[in-house]
Amino acid sequence: MRMKKIFAAIIIILCFTTAFLLKGCRTTFFNFDTRNMSFLYNPSVTLLHPECFVYHSSDTLSLLFFKINTNELFFNTQSKDFFNKARIQVHYRLLDAAKNDELLDSATVSYFIQRGAKQGKFITYIPIHTSHLQKYTLEVIYIDFFRHRGSQSILSFDKSTLNSPQNFFLSSEQLKEPWFQNTFHEDDLIKIRYDRQPISKIFVKYYNITSPLPLPPFSTKKMVSEKLIPDSIWTIPYNDSTIFRLVQKGMYFIQTDTTKSDGLTLLNFGKFYPEIKEAEELIKPIRFLTTKKKFEELNTYENSKIALDDFWLKLTGTVAHSKELLRIYYSRIQLANKFFVSYTEGWKTDRGMIYTVFGSPGTIFKSDNMEKWIYGERTNQPSMNFTFEKVDNTFSENDYVLIRNDIYKTSWFQAVDVWRNGKAYSVEN
């Protein structure tokens, strides 16, 4: 029922926009602050999970690249004209971020995909005319036409500088296709492209950082931001075939001009990221659920696997129940790693912490510099509100900090107690 409502809302938005554009007017404003955007962090509410990014290929043109898993599409077997074909409609709205999300441009493009598409992926791009020296918000709606289901993405991008992340195009040398994340594994061969102006080399700054866990939501202790200093700096000759690897775990900052502050952040968080599979890494997120003393005891075990099994088995009492609880907890960790990665692992961020312990929020209101998460609004339980402020971070456009408050103490310990009693906490369920 919830997924049908979200899809219905997407269809209404799409129909409204189409009708509006036919009238020839272009001064509409879109207020994201009053729309529930919870679908952004809840993959269960939609059957489509596309990935996308924007690349600035010139001063007047940007390319919206997107990838769709063809296994998620409905292939028509009833129609002679469309036999074994899927149909995707992609609708975008380009908004002026500096003018309260004023509509600048809009278009809808349709694609027919034959069953058996290469490696189960459909990858293409849509050219969008953009101006130099401007910041944008891009709303993208994907519709599986034959299934009547949809998905939505919201992108913020910057064309006001020549060194912003969207000026770099990354692709996988092994797969021969665009790369849709900024996280890599040590064996990935990365090809980089830059078209905005002629360059002969790119600069790489490497940071071997180990980020601490976030403080509890009720903590009054002030976090002090450390100024990051690169552990090493080097240059790579640039040409059309420039390929490199992120051999060491850590953060790599790519620039074409070191006199500017912005650039592209690439991350290596280990060979399994966004998943966590190694026992010594699986123990770390347990800190959210246990006391400092108990956590220190777990780290005294000679065998991390035994320590991990011992912790979860004591919570549940049975192996089967323990496996199920562990599956739920670390699936949230994996999703947090996907949605909230900044310059550190997603689960170590404030949003990642709340997402892991409380689950996916039922309501999210989002603006350019803030997110408000609401739990319990559609249940009989009292609602809980968490507000996250966007941080101006050189290394990440996805860094948000929770506005902490002592009022969260009761809710936090209630949620933790549910986990300690062998149950997965979720307000919405």
Image (spheres, rainbow, N blue to C red):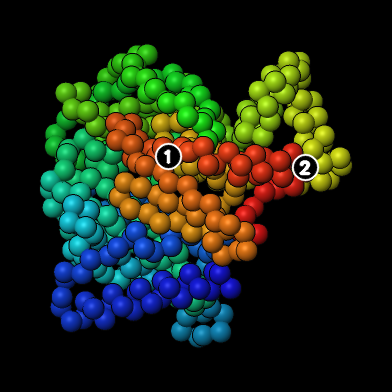
The quarter of the rendered structure image containing the N terminus is bottom right
The image position of residue 254, as x and y in percent, is 30, 28
Q: Residue at x 54, y 38 (%)?
A: 353
Q: 249 or 82: nearer the eye?
A: 249
How far apart marks 1 and 2 lie (CA) works out to: 28 Å
Q: Report whether 224 appears left or right of 118.
A: left
Q: Residue at x 68, y 27 (%)?
A: 291
| Residue matched to label 1 | 403
The image position of residue 311, as x and y in percent, is 77, 31
Q: 424 or 120: nearer the eye?
A: 424
**Marker count (numbered):** 2
The quarter of the rendered structure image containing the C terminus is bottom right
Q: Secondary structure at mark 1?
A: loop
Q: Which quadrant of the structure image shows residue 216?
A: top right
Q: Choose the circle earlier in sequence order: 1 or 2.
A: 1
- Disc 1 crowd rating (10 Å Cα; few below 14, some 14-19, many 20+) is few
- Disc 2 crowd rating (10 Å Cα; few below 14, some 14-19, many 20+) is few
Q: Which quadrant of the structure image shows residue 271?
A: top right
The amino acid at mark 1 is Ile
| Residue matched to label 2 | 421
Tag 1 and tag 2, C-beta contact below 8 Å = no
Q: Is residue 59 visible?
A: no
Q: Is residue 389 visible?
A: yes
The label shown at residue 366 is none
Q: Residue at x 87, y 42 (%)?
A: 318
The amino acid at mark 2 is Asn
The image position of residue 23, as x and y in percent, is 18, 82
Q: Report whether 321 appears left or right of 79.
A: right
Q: Secondary structure at mark 2?
A: loop
Q: Which residue is the extreme one toward the front? A: 407
The image position of residue 307, as x and y in percent, is 76, 25
